[in-house]
Image (cartoon, grey):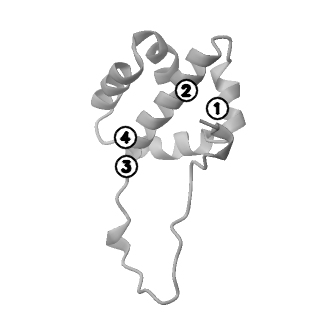
Amino acid sequence: MQLKFIKWDAEIPKSADEPVDEEEYVFDASDYMYRLMALTFADELTTNPKTILKQFIAGLGCEKVITDKRAKIEDADELWANIKTDVGAEHAAVIIPILKGE
């Protein structure tokens, strides 16, 4: 996977021919986005164990997304438990505090 090609915050393209129906794409999947980021960060930590995760995240340019979406987390306790299951306890101990903003 080439992480430099991932864009973390994309606008939905608008067509002049189609009426805008906000309800079709307003679904906010911030929980899934956090889980995807956690998997990506865990992969980086597995591939390059000496990676400084905060610098890696800065290089991806997704700090603002992490901060902005934090308020939209539906059930934080469930999300952190899911991430811990997804990436394992060792990686979760590093990744979850960063995602929480600690």
- Residue at image location 55% in from the left, 45% down from the top: 65
Residue position marked by numbered label 2 in the rendering: 41
Q: How far apart are marks 2 and 1 (CA)?
A: 8 Å
Q: How far apart are marks 4 and 2 (CA)?
A: 15 Å
Q: Nearer the viewer, residue 72 or 40?
A: 40
Residue position marked by numbered label 3 in the rendering: 29
Q: Nearer the viewer, residue 34 or 87?
A: 87
Residue 44 pos. (x, y %): 59, 23
Q: Distance between the residues labelled 2 and 3?
A: 18 Å
Q: How crowded is mark 2: few (under 14 residues within 10 Å), some or many (20 or more)?
A: many
Residue 21 pos. (x, y %): 36, 78
**Residue 35 is drawn in which quadrant?**
top left
Mark positioned earlier in the residue sequence (1 or 3):
3
Q: Residues within 10 Å of mark 4 (few under 14, many from 20)?
A: many
Helix, strand or loop at mark 2? helix
Q: Which of 40 and 96 is in front in this view?
A: 40
Helix, strand or loop at mark 3? loop
Residue position marked by numbered label 1 in the rendering: 57
